[in-house]
Image: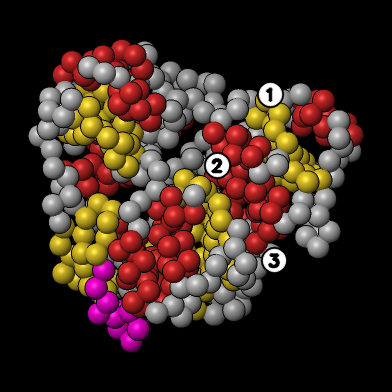
Amino acid sequence: MYQINFDHPIKVHFIGIGGISMSGLAVILSRNGFAVSGSDAHLSPLTEELASRGIRIYEGNRPSNLDAEPDVVVYTAAVHPDNPEFARAKELGIPMLTRAQLLGQIMKNYPTAIGVSGTHGKTTVTSMMSYVLLNAGTDPTISVGGMLPRIGGNIHVGTGDTFLTEACEYTNRFLSLYPTLEIILNIEEDHLDFFKDIEDIRRSFRRYMELLPEKGHLIINSSIPNLEELTEGLACRSISTFGMDPKKSGYSYKNAMPDATGCYSFTVTAPGKPSDGCFVQLQVPGLHNVANALAVIAACTEMGIKPEVIASSLGEFSGTDRRFQKKGEVRGVTIIDDYAHHPREISATLEAAKKYPHKKLWVIFQPHTYSRTKAFFDDFADSLSAADEVILAKIYPARETDTLGMDSSQLAAAIASRGTPAASFETFAEIEEFAMSRCQPGDLLITMGAGDVVNIGEELLSKVF
């Protein structure tokens, strides 16, 4: 594998530079003196931001985009050998790195490299931890999978020796990283278009844990089934657990109370640790965010950060884009947007929503990929039926083309069979018209999914009714 010498900046070209993670890595290299260029199928606010930083942006993938002959080309898992730029790079003999390989090489330059992994919750926990590290004065370099207002985007290039990033398990990407501290939030079935089953996923996470050096530290959720099987014999110096069960968690909580918007306050229980007895008031709703906060508390306490800094920083954090984000109100209807696209995430979001002031709870859900919809069909129907009414958009294909015989009307029928009214539509325009003809003042409408469903809420808010 090609190795970048960060003491000698070179020319780097990104295929798919407009992605949330790729754009962040491009900024890190650009800030460190590298000559960066990149292409994407469509221009976006992210590519415009990159261009404003002096990065050369090409719209569309063309062989000519490599005429300047970069020293190395970086590409994502969505780029295949028939991509014109990928093929041209191979023809020219230009070294190539995956996004994960580049991320790993960047991590190697930092004495403290933190990887936040798990089936869900990565962006929220990385964002929460960003607040703590920044307020603690460490000035970390941060790469987060969402837009975080505190850092003005998805990337912060600091001057300190700490690097914080999400570590995604899909296609075993996180096995290319070099973490010294790992946070593992959960290990559940997902990405079954790549993994065979839950045991395959667990093996992958075990291999990820084995990347920790002897001086490394593991922070892991105590509720993961057969935890000892995963952690036995690891070389890292210490393992700390967090979770909602105080009896089996090193870091847990007591006296959790929600406020009028479903945001919890609680007291930390961590016997023998400085954060024991610490009081935390969150500004993000849902009991699942108590668990997210406990992961951050465990990691930051083990790093030696003062409990009062941890607590005040968590109390300051008000969320990231697309994580139970209030977009506004239209005709008295509150519109929330959320990235939930896995049944477990949907259940957590709807649990939080039930504590949020509302008359009727509406969900506009866009299933993400045919394979995930098929693999978790009954789980999706069960979790979505917790809403009062559900509206389904067409399945967002993402990287897939095979429908596997799935469509949203089937999911709508399954939800309706569970007693929750559900309808599916082919276009966003039909969904918008249906929603506004049915929603009443005081209702809560959540646009939900990992695709472009967010555009529905934004379109509604832009209209004059």
Q: Residue at x 59, y 54 (%)?
A: 174
Mark 3 crowdedness (10 Å alpha carbons): few <14, some 14-19, many ≥20:
some
Query: Which three-letter amino acid code belongs to the residue tagged 2?
Result: Ile
Q: Give the main secondary structure of the magenta stretch.
A: loop
Q: Which residues are magenta?
A: 270-280
On screen, residue 134 above or below 397: below
Marks 2,3: beta carbons within 8 A: no
Mark 1 crowdedness (10 Å alpha carbons): few <14, some 14-19, many ≥20:
some
Could you tell me which quadrant the C terminus lies in? Answer: top left
Horizontal and vertical percent position of residue 161: 62, 71
Query: Which three-letter amino acid code belongs to the residue tagged 3?
Result: Asn
Quarter of the image for residue 370 reads top left
Q: CA distance from mark 3 to mark 1?
A: 32 Å
On screen, residue 45 above or below 412: below
Q: Which mark is residue 60?
A: 1
Residue 424 painted magenta: no
Marks 3,1: beta carbons within 8 A: no
Q: Secondary structure at mark 2?
A: helix
Horizontal and vertical percent position of residue 375: 40, 33
Q: Which mark is residue 20?
A: 2
Residue 274 painted magenta: yes
Mark 3 — residue? 109
Horizontal and vertical percent position of residue 289: 30, 56
Query: Which three-letter amino acid code belongs to the residue tagged 1?
Result: Gly
Q: CA distance from mark 2 to mark 1?
A: 17 Å
On screen, residue 420 above or below 12: above
Q: CA distance from mark 2 to mark 3?
A: 22 Å
Q: Secondary structure at mark 3?
A: loop
Task: Compare marks 3 and 1 and give the one earlier in the sequence.
Answer: 1
In the current view of this chain or complex, which residue is farthest to the left? 359
